[in-house]
Image (cartoon, helix red, strand yellow):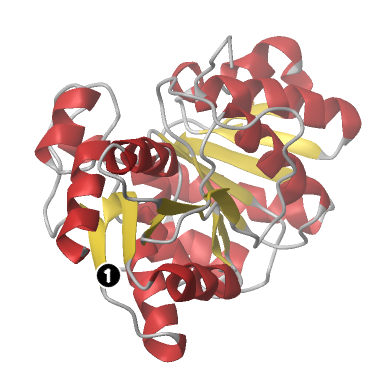
């Protein structure tokens, strides 16, 4: 697919589309609009953009108040700040009353362009998965970002966490793709091992499947864009078909996709598995390529985990 865009750019462009279609959509920014690309809304639809400053707790409270009046506010900030600076406010005034507020965590995972370890967020899925009433969506590419945003506005009546990465990567979907909340997507059929990914790691699972195919190993690739509610049946089906499972995520393996899959299989289909992801460590500041290599998140690492099971 040509014209690959970063998820954050698609985020800004899709917000403008949604505002034109749904006048109640608003954007609240935590003084990061030029990074999250909420500045696209500030430039093109300024009456729907509110600069809240470096005051994430207050921003969550304002979003909750707007939601009670029938607006659909998007909170736009970095994943690290959405997860940690204003978590109590989100818990009390957004999640508990089930308000339709969409918390967008930009610059997620380790691929944050040398912003430093304080800006890395590899625990955000764990945190929001554990929060009652919260929907958690982690798109793979630009096409899925746009469709997921429409779904969160039009098909949901409650709080959600939308996890986005910073830099452009490959696209695996085209305009024929149809995103559905709570539904996993089979990207590739295979009988030898199941590679289950979320976000951009699902694309790396496809690349890992190509590496395995060179050795005659046929990998089943499952993309899980909605971490909550989780498509348990799709996970069980993948495990039953292959007998071996590898999960992959740009996130800690504690409480993220790997944990979610292990929980499902432990209760429904006990299956040998490996979890590819951040171990119990904090990230560092470096290039995306260097960090993916250091923390074992590349297609080669995913393929190696599959070979261990085989």
User: Is residue 197 in sight in this rendering?
Assistant: no
x, y percentage for residue 79? Answer: 40, 43
- Seen in the picture, residue 271 relative to 310 is either above or below; the reply is below
Instruction: Indicate left or right for 223 with 86 as reference.
Output: right
- Seen in the picture, residue 24 relative to 258 is either above or below; the reply is above
- Which quadrant would residue 272 be assigned to in this image? bottom left
- Which quadrant would residue 292 be assigned to in this image? top left
Q: Which quadrant is home to the N terminus?
A: top right
x, y percentage for residue 196? Answer: 41, 56
What residue lies at 50% left-to-right and 69% top-to-bottom? 235
What residue lies at 46% left-to-right and 63% top-to-bottom? 128
x, y percentage for residue 251? Answer: 30, 51
Q: Which quadrant is home to the C terminus?
A: bottom left
Dot 1: within a 10 Å radius of its alpha carbon, few (fewer than 14), some, or many (20 or more) residues? many
What residue lies at 76% left-to-right and 58% top-to-bottom? 156
x, y percentage for residue 73? Answer: 69, 43
Mark 1 lies on a secondary structure that is strand
User: Is residue 172 in sight in this rendering?
Assistant: yes
**Relative to the observer, which residue lies in front, 300 or 30?**
300
User: Which residue is identified by label 1?
Assistant: 273
Q: How many marks?
A: 1
**Relative to the observer, which residue lies in front, 235 or 126?**
235
């Amino acid at each position: 697919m040509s014209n690959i865009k970063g998820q954050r750019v698609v985020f800004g462009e899709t917000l403008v589309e949604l505002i034109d279609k749904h006048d109640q959509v608003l954007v609240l920014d935590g003084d990061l609009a030029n990074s999250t690309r909420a500045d696209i809304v500030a430039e093109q639809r300024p009456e729907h953009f509110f600069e809240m400053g470096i005051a994430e707790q207050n921003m969550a409270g304002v979003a909750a108040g707007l939601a009670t009046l029938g607006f659909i506010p998007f909170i736009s900030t970095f994943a690290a700040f959405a997860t940690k600076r204003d978590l109590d406010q989100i818990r009390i005034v957004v999640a508990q009353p089930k308000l339709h507020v969409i918390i967008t965590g930009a610059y997620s995972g380790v691929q944050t362009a040398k912003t430093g370890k304080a800006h890395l967020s590899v625990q955000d899925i764990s945190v929001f998965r554990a929060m009652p009433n919260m929907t958690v969506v982690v798109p793979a590419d630009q096409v899925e970002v746009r469709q997921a945003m429409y779904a969160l506005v039009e098909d949901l009546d409650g709080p959600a966490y939308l996890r986005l990465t910073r830099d452009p990567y490959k696209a695996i979907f085209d305009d024929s793709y149809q995103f559905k909340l709570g539904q996993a997507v089979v990207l590739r059929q295979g009988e030898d091992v199941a590679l289950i990914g979320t976000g951009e790691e699902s694309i790396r699972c496809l690349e890992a499947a190509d590496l395995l195919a060179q050795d005659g190993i046929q990998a089943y690739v499952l993309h899980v864009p909605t971490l909550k509610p989780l498509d348990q049946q799709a996970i069980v089906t993948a495990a039953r078909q292959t007998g071996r499972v590898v999960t992959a995520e740009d996130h800690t393996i504690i409480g993220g996709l790997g944990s979610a899959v292990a929980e499902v299989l432990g209760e429904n289909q006990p299956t040998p598995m490996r979890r590819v992801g951040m171990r119990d460590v904090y990230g560092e500041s470096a290039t995306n390529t260097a960090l993916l290599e250091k923390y074992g998140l590349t297609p080669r690492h995913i393929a190696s985990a599959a070979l261990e099971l085989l």
